[in-house]
């Protein structure tokens, strides 16, 4: 799709090399994404004191939401809860690799049935100095608990299905007896 010549240079679409998202889609950013506030090539200080180089790949809320198949509202909800913390350029949210990693962990935890507070505890351990070992040990203990919970649910479901099948057979016998 061609960009109209009247589009200001800070919003023209550009394709950055090596920009492949986890969904396998090539990242299309804007020159404004690459320069963030017109800093063009200089390093910048992001949220929480992290130093970001101007060449670091960034994403908008629309790109993040599309890649992960969630709504903008969901992304903002996780931000409101402090689970992700994008950089801000005025009213614009700028997401970095760290935000995408945290969002991926949040969504994985949700799929596995973890409550958001438990997910917060797990992903916050990534930010601790030398926290990798303690984080992994904690995650393993949480996996064991989650597995036990799911196995109990499976046993409950299998028992309920067996009860339904027995009731169904009884009803079918009664129906057959009525002719």
Image (cartoon, grey):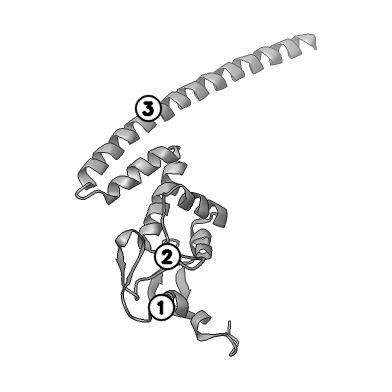
User: Which residue is under mark 3?
Assistant: 148
The residue pinned by badge 2 equals 21
| Number of residues whose C-alpha sits closer than 10 Å to that of mark 2, classed few (under 14), some (14–19) or many (20 or more) | some
Q: Position of residue 82 (x, y in %)?
A: 42, 49
The image quadrant of residue 118 is top left
Q: Give the x, y percent position of residue 29.
A: 47, 74
- The answer to whether 48 is drawn above or below residue 16 in the figure is above
Tell me where residue 160 appears, x and y as whole percent: 55, 20
State the separation of the CA atoms marked 2 and 1.
20 Å
| Cβ atoms under marks 1 and 3 closer than 8 Å | no
Residue labelled with disc 1: 35
Packing grade of label 3 (10 A; few <14, some 14-19, many >=20) is: few
Q: Secondary structure at mark 3?
A: helix
Task: Please report whichever mark, 1 or 3, sits nearer to the chain's N-terminal start.
Answer: 1
At a point 50% along the width and 62% down the height, the residue shown is: 61
Residue 137 as seen in the image, left or right of residue 38: left
Distance CA(mark 3)–CA(mark 2): 34 Å
For discs 1 and 3, the disc positioned in front in the rendered view? 1
């Amino acid at each position: 799709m061609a960009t109209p010549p009247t589009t200001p240079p800070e919003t023209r679409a550009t394709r950055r090399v090596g920009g492949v998202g986890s969904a396998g889609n090539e990242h299309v950013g804007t020159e404004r994404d690459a320069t963030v506030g017109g800093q063009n090539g200089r390093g910048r200080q992001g949220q929480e004191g992290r130093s970001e180089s101007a060449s670091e790949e960034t994403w908008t809320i629309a790109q993040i939401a599309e890649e992960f198949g969630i709504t903008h509202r969901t992304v903002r909800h996780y931000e409101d809860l402090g689970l992700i913390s994008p950089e801000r350029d005025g009213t614009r949210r700028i997401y970095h690799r760290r935000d995408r990693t945290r969002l991926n962990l949040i969504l994985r935890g949700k799929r596995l049935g973890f409550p958001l507070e438990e997910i917060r505890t797990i992903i916050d351990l990534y930010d601790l100095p030398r926290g990798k070992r303690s984080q992994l040990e904690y995650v393993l203990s949480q996996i064991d608990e989650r597995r036990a919970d799911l196995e109990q649910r499976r046993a409950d479901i299998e028992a309920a299905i067996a009860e339904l099948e027995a009731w169904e057979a009884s009803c079918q016998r009664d129906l057959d007896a009525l002719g």
